[in-house]
Image (spheres, rainbow, N blue to C red):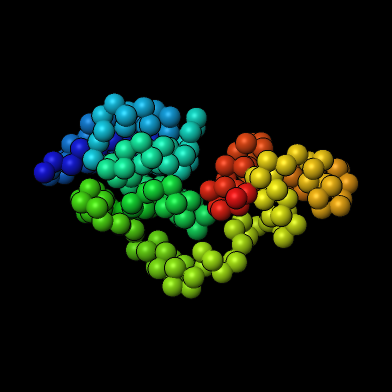
Amino acid sequence: MTVRVLVVDDHPLYREGLVTAISTMPEKEVVGEAADGAEAVRLADELVPDVVVMDLHMPVMNGVEATREVTGRHPAVAVLVLTMLENDESVFAAIRAGARGYLLKGADRAEIGRALDGVAHGEVVFSSAIAGRVISYFAAGRAGSGVAPFPELTDREREVLDLVARGLTNAAIARQLVVTDKTVRNHVSNVFAKLHVAGRAEAVARARDAGLGH
């Protein structure tokens, strides 16, 4: 069976190299390429590939959101994340969004080829560096053990972010925490700076991906 692949990456040179590499693999066919998440969703609708190779950090729509859209619309399409991001937050956000595999961009051609075959046949595939952390995460029961996401935030900043993700305004958060509006504004500004987000909508998306705001 030929595995039909859609390649998604916003760096033209890397995407071109990846397309070339996959095209030379036996029983692999690149059926399309996209430079951002929104284009990936559109092409997945149009082409319905077997596998989408998905970068995470992209403009317009990031890879986690695109993965959620693609897997929601096409449960049979496997998403294989191929990214430079190896932090726990990115890994588990991608898994929660429906990704079946997670490789780092240092992966060689053979590893990518094996991963494409694996996810196309319903397997879950992680690069060795990621696999150990995933196993440890679930072995330790971290998902339910209260280990907080976003370790760079203070407890109060995480609490504020959770309330932001629940849709509360700064004034409502101030009333709930019994602090001044200015204090909340300062906390929100610190959260945005530490998470490197441009505004409230992006912060909410990041928070919900990490399990906050529910």
Residue shown at 61%/56% (left/top)? 150
Please give left or right for residue 81 compared with residue 3 in the image: right
Residue 103 percent across, percent down from the top left:
35, 53
Please give left or right for residue 5 compared with residue 136 in the image: left
Total number of numbered labels? 0
Residue 73 percent across, percent down from the top left:
36, 36
Residue 202 percent across, percent down from the top left:
60, 38
Residue shown at 38%/40% (left/top)? 72
Q: Is residue 12 visible?
A: no
Residue 46 percent across, percent down from the top left:
29, 26
Residue shown at 33%/47% (left/top)? 80
Q: Is residue 35 above or below residue 157?
A: above
Which of the pair 134/193 is nearer the observer?
Answer: 134
Q: Is residue 23 above or below residue 209?
A: above
What residue occupies the far right of the structure in this picture? 180
The quadrant in which the N terminus is found is top left
Q: Is residue 168 above or below residue 122?
A: above
Q: Is residue 167 visible?
A: yes
Please give left or right for residue 168 compared with residue 91 in the image: right
What residue occupies the far bottom of the structure in this picture? 140
Residue shown at 67%/50% (left/top)? 162
Which of the pair 105/92 is nearer the observer?
Answer: 92
Please give left or right for residue 167 compared with residue 4 in the image: right
